Image (cartoon, rainbow, N blue to C red):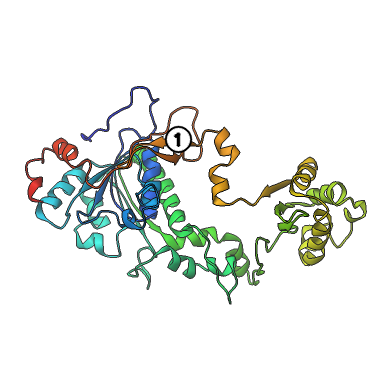
Amino acid sequence: MTVEAGSDATARRRPLEGVLVVAMEQAVAGPFATRHLADQGARVIKIERVDGGDFARGFDTLASGLGAHFTWLNRTKESLALDVKSTVGKRVLDALLARADLFLHNLAPGAAGDLGLGATELAELHQRLIVCEISGYGTGGPYDSRRAYDLLIQSEAAVVSVTGTVDEPIKPGIAIADIAAGCYAYSSVLTALLARERTGRGCVLDVSMLDAVAEWMGYPVTVSRHGSVPRMVTGMSHPAIAPYDAYPVGDGSRIALSVQNDREWVRLARRVLGRDDLADDPRFATNGARVENRDEVDRLVVERLSELDFAAAEKLILGAGLACARINSVAELVDHPQLSARGRWVEVESPVGVLPTMLPPAPSSAWDVALGPIPDLGADNDRILAELGLADIFQTA
């Protein structure tokens, strides 16, 4: 690989430094995966359409004038605006792929093949190249040619039925199908890079949004697969655990409370509810019994907590060695004291100036996260093409 990323002399060496990623991505799933690769030091060259780029750039202007999704997912990447259908654009892309360690895309079904970028063909041409294709339904099967978006996959994967009900499905407020696929793409690429170190050969990764969310549906799918009907619950309750919900307290607020095992129930009964007799009551002594008697369990909890304000309820529950939580707004999450204390908010450059961004999970003691700018469309064209020795021809692309 001859295209090298610039290095920060003050940063400890990141694990993916020297890895070149070429991405034809848009929206969330692909950019989520590659941003995490970039966070760990990979050089990510984002190939964008010349007529507007990644369409997430234009979803809104809520990040100080930039698209919020784009701002979230595209720091530390380089933008190359390229007409990949043109002769010159194809030549530039071929030159990049010849040097790349990973080619990742979440193009519409069939689009990569139409561009001559089919996974099998690329793998044969570049034996060390890892090709990661993210699609809605994966390769093969009656749905493999269908376009897919987060809402559609959440519907097909029954997520909306367990968040709401079959009669009144409710979509979670974040794009979990996109994020799930991005998570599996990221982890699968890391695995493939490790395997290549051992074998010297790349591979093809077929990441399906439906597969990813079906995996996340583990509990209800397992129950159904074994011949039972998963319990339907409403609000914040849980089909297999009780007490588990957001309970009202005396000041009009609510507190999230979960009792995960029978030992915790004993502590709740004695130290929170003040009822020693409930600790070994056969109606409540086991989780299965509590689930069967959920209404009575919830009544007991609400009755006690209604006597307290939030601060007193929280102190009592935590003092009993149990877990509880405040139900925050998004604004309260942004200013969460734990995030602030752990320095989770940092700043990066962007086309509109310095913007806040959140560090990725799992900080390392051995290296720092890469925090490069959010790129403007085509911001890196001149430099990338000069590195490839193709600057003179690009003006006709």
Residue 126 visible from this viewpoint:
no
Query: Which residue occupies the extreme top position in the image?
Result: 10
In the picture shown, does residue 153 fall above or below 72?
below
Residue at 16% from the left image edge and 44% from the top image edge: 95
In the picture shown, does residue 327 fall above or below 147?
above
Percent across and percent down for residue 382 are 16, 39
Residue at 32% from the left image edge and 56% from the top image edge: 58
- Using residue 157 as the reference point, say whether residue 261 is left or right of it: right
Name the residue beneath numbered marker 1. Answer: 346
Percent across and percent down for residue 276 are 91, 51
Query: Which residue occupies the extreme bottom position in the image?
Result: 167
Percent across and percent down for residue 53 are 25, 53
Most foreground residue, 377 or 323: 377
> For the residue labelled by badge 1, is the local secondary structure a helix, a strand or a loop?
strand
- Using residue 391 as the reference point, say whether residue 376 is left or right of it: right
* Numbered marks: total: 1
Q: Quadrant of the N terminus?
A: top left
Q: Residues within 10 Å of mark 1 (few under 14, many from 20)?
A: few
Q: Quadrant of residue 340?
A: top right
Most foreground residue, 18 or 49: 49
Most foreground residue, 24 or 272: 272
In the picture shown, does residue 205 fall above or below 18?
below
- Amino acid of disc 1: Val
Percent across and percent down for residue 348 are 38, 36
